[in-house]
Image (spheres, rainbow, N blue to C red):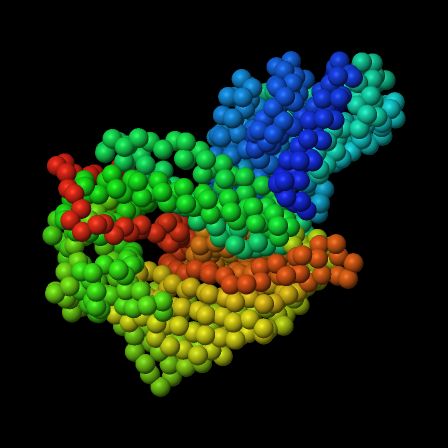
Amino acid sequence: MKKEIFLVPYAHLDTQWRWEYPTTIGKYIKRTLTENLKHFDRFSDYQFTFTGAIRYQMMKDYYPEDFARLKEYVRQGRWHLAGTCMDETDALIPCVESMVRNVLYGDRWQAKEFGRSSRDYMIPDCFGFPGNMPTVLLHCGIRGFSTQKLTWHSAAGIPFGIGIWKGKDGSELPSALDPCAYVSKVKSPFFLNRQRLKRLKAQIKTTGIGKSFQYFGVGDIGGAPGTGSVKAARAAAAKSPLKGDITIRQGSPDQFFRTLTPQEKEKLQRYEGDLLLTLHSAGTLTSAAVMKRWNRKNEQLAFAAEAAACAAWFQAGQAYPADKIRKAWRLVLGSQMHDILPGTSTPDAYTYAHNDEVLALNLWSSILEDAAAALAPLAGGEGDILLYNPCELSRKDPVRVDLSGREAYRGLKGECLLTDPEGREYGGQVVTDEKGRQILCFIPALEPFSWTRFSLHRDRTTVSSPVSLRKRESGYLLENECYRVLVTLEGAVSSIYHKDLDREILSRPPAYELQKEVPGIFPAWNMDWKDRQKPPFVRMEAGGTVSVAEEGPRRCTLRIETPCASSRFLREISLSAGSEIVEFCETIDWNETGCSLKLAFTGAMETGRFTTNWESSREVRDVNHEKIYEMPSRYWADLSSGEDWGFSILEDSKYGYDHPAADTLRMTLLYTPGLKRSDPFRDQSSQDRGRHTIRYALYGHPGDWRQGSDVQARRFNQPVRPFLLSPGSARQPGRHTPLFRLDTE
């Protein structure tokens, strides 16, 4: 049997972590170049591996002469490209589209600059990996995945050293899940490296394959592997085969995965499912709430803007804004780096990251506005309200349009009527919000990816009232065709009754719960099982002041103001005509520490099947236990009673949940950890203090999540985009048609 240990010489660099971009550029990028170029000058067979197009771009921009030398070593096949990504990303928060874009733009950048690219995904340092990654990465043409992070308390253990990670669809991704720490050294003589030889022996014993994949190098501040390790690796490779017929090779992960034969892959062990960390990920699902909210908004706005740009190019002949799109995605992907988006960087680092998020939001918005200007003349009708449905679904969802400053609508309030280009009529209502703005609300029927103009008639009204709000002795009753929601005078949501299901959805009012969180180490990263076993030290179902925020036949909203500990919560509960969801919006002035803020939903069921969402796959989760007690999900999480009925919580920016009892799910809203006296991460004791806006909704359904949770979450996260056109906006011959239609929902 041929025996081989494949070494990957590597330097890990956190683009921001306990430092910021200026330090990365001025010190750590420079160090990585300087130290490696010295090794290349000294050792004729030196090899090195580095990831991240963003970091290479920094080298090119700030150290062009050294970058030119680097390119020559890439050409010689000695400086190895790896990772095939813009940066070493977080894997739990970014959506599937972000993962695809990270590979797409990283691959294109490498090909443009170096004339070649890698085909592996190298994320040595991250806080868990979703079970749909094999499917997504194989779709992107990736040949292999490697990480060393599972040694940090993996909930599933380490399934194998080298093996096959399977996706839910049967996709099989060769993976190295135990390749030594990236800061490990190579000692001389190599045959005395017991731990490295032990990994090879274990691989042979379990699979009969004589190959081992192993990192060595430095981190987290870049640089180059130590001279001792470089000499030892060179000597071992030069003397190969060593004692026992072991060949030592050096190179990139891409090169290693290319060497695996179909016969070898068939023999490898297989694992299917998530690769989550018990400790070193639970907090990162919620830390840096503003980053997570702006990241979600950027992901959704990116989709809306690109589809709009396609329509404007295809139908109006407007130039496609490819450069703007690349620039915006680069800003978003850069901020998804595995310490920035998870919430473990310094406050000063977030000054840069927040700025990048806002720059990206402005770029997407400008693309949308340009598309609206191009398509408005083709949208039909003469109205000055233009609506864009940036979604592949036909929909009837509430749309809110700010009419403030438009002279034609000054003083308009109450009911009104709108018409579309086909003459269809829609009832609307105009209310004045808490900022004194005139807000029009109506519920149009919109085709997928459609642009439609509506006319507002202030002198015509409707009389139907599909939504009502009534005050009773016991509280306020909100009602539409689907729900009856009762809110007590003290602010408790005492009943959410689903008419079609003919049942109460919850057995107890939704409750704010403050859960003690004082992790032993790594506060922004960790939540401890010892804390999760304790009951919340505050549970609050009521105790607020209730008022009417909005009332009309299309939409009604109650407002509940509640003090809690040192913080203050403002909750709005809304029902819209025809809506299948109960909407909530929380505005929270947060001033706590040493705890998380959770929302608890207790279903009117004896036991529930808790399902979380990875977009392209789903995971059924157990009740909290010592291995997994904070669970990731995107867009929705569901609790269903067998195949009879259930409810989903839809959200616009939250990712952490837990399942403390068979009938209960909790969504984590905010997390400000407590610190031990000796904790070095002092800045994290006040993280996320300030004001936050969080939207979520409850969706009751027959069966389980398959009965519409994806569709409802999609509509909730991707709203209709309104534009108020200038009076008398131009019209052109011809007619806009939706970009495309699906033959099935």
Instruction: Please name whichever residue, 572 or 351, is drawn nearer the observer in this view of the structure.
Output: 351
Which quadrant: the C terminus?
top left
Instruction: Please name whichever residue, 482 or 232, is drawn nearer the observer in this view of the structure.
Output: 232
Q: Residue at x 28, y 57 (%)?
A: 401
Q: Residue at x 31, y 44 (%)?
A: 369
Tell me: 39 left or right of 386.
right
Residue found at the very far bottom of the displayed protein: 473
Give above or below for 416 relative to 378: below
Tell me: 571 left or right of 247.
left
Number of dots carrying numbers: 0
**Where is residue 335, by image quadrant?**
top right
Give above or below for 181 relative to 118: below
**Where is residue 57, by image quadrant?**
top right
Give above or below for 236 relative to 499: above
Tell me: 408 left or right of 54.
left
Location of residue 411 in the rendering, given as x and y in whole percent from the top left corner: 21, 68
Location of residue 159 in the rendering, given as x and y in whole percent from the top left corner: 67, 38
Tell me: 212 left or right of 704.
right
Q: Residue at x 59, y 55 (%)?
A: 287
Location of residue 207 in the rendering, given as x and y in whole percent from the top left corner: 70, 27
Instruction: Please name whichever residue, 317 or 277, is drawn nearer the observer in this view of the structure.
Output: 317
**Where is residue 46, by image quadrant?**
top right
